[in-house]
Image (cartoon, rainbow, N blue to C red):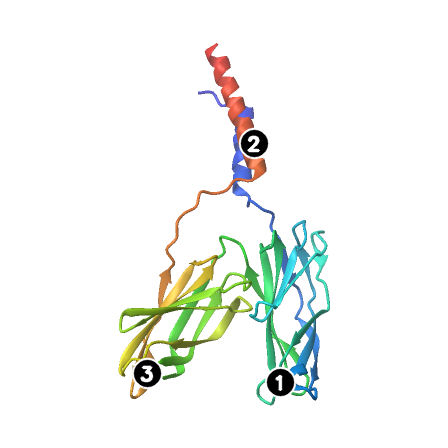
Amino acid sequence: MRITRMTRILFGLVALILSLPVWAQYYVQATDPVEGTCTIFDEVDDINDRTEFSITATGTMALPAGSPNMVVIGGTNEDGRWFMTQSTVPGAALPGPLPWIVHRLPTVGDPVTLGLSLYPVSAGAAVGTGFGVDVSCDSNGVFSASPSVMVSAEAGAPYSVSYTGGVIGGTCSETNISGSVNGSVFLPPPLDDNLVVYIAVNGTPVGTGYNTLNPASTSGIQTFDYDFPATTLPYSITGTVYPWRNGIPVGTGVTITYHCTAQGLSSSEPQSVTAARSTPVPALSSWALLLLAGLSAWVAVRRMRGTT
């Protein structure tokens, strides 16, 4: 079979287009540490007590066309979503400063903290990559921010929950266990619940819990708090935790078994587990479909000429 130069070029273009993502790479990124100020309002009427943040993030963005095309997510409540429309010029500067109000006052040893995430948005859904940060205001009105972390809304992002070592400072009763464990998470956007835990008592499933972590990427101490039907000591609780997106577990999770006795709470070594998933047929971009149609027509013409 002869392969002409034109055939090679066409097949090369097909391979190139099919290797590209279906949508452009949108992003919101911070290039410098997040800065800001906070003001405490201790009102006569407690219902009006609040801490007001003014947050400045220096960075760049490349956003989809359309409105809205960006979202700022503050905290984990449903009202903490600020959709906006910003410049679609690649490399445009981040908007700011960003105002945010938390209806709580800081106290000594208990600052007001706020998880904050910024993502590109297309058709109302987060896309591409963004960044997250924790900001806080102490009882003296001093603002601080954690280093920013990259977060992702990409369908193929390596979402994961990972724990290492044993339980830290855990407690247990006949209806609850709580404590902490070292680990890291990389989760879907916190527009909805982005973490799920399946709970089993003495090997019998008893419930499923959901949570929203914002920002969706953290490393260090991860807390847990499980309620379950009353169970006599001693017992074992197995928690299997996955990233959660669009109503299903995704990526890589972790399972860990806690043992509650009269002497307290201990745990097994955490084990990595993979979420069951189907393999979707890759979607093709409009350009890829057009090129494939053109290539098919060209091949058909060549065949007709070869048999005439």
Residue 263 locus on image (x, y percent): 30, 88
Picture disc at residue 291: 2
Measure how far apart labels 1 and 3 are at the Cα level.
33 Å
The mark closer to the camera, 2 or 1, is: 1
Residue 255 locus on image (x, y percent): 35, 68
Going by the numbered disc 2, the residue's amino acid type is Leu
- Ranked by sequence position, the earlier of labels 3 and 2 is 3
In this rendering, the answer to whether 34 lies above or below 89 is below
Going by the numbered disc 1, the residue's amino acid type is Pro
Left or right position of 233 against 167: left
Residue topped by disc 1: 106
- Ranked by sequence position, the earlier of labels 2 and 1 is 1
| Contact, mark 1 vs mark 3 (Cβ under 8 Å) | no
The residue located at (32%, 83%) in the rendering is 174
Number of other residues with Cα within 10 Å of mark 3, as a class: few under 14, some 14 to 19, many 20 or more: some
Query: Residue extending furthest top?
Result: 308
Dot 3 lies on which element? loop
Picture disc at residue 174: 3
Among the 4 quarters of the image, the one containing residue 6? top right
Going by the numbered disc 3, the residue's amino acid type is Glu
Picture disc at residue 65: none
Residue 88 locus on image (x, y percent): 70, 52
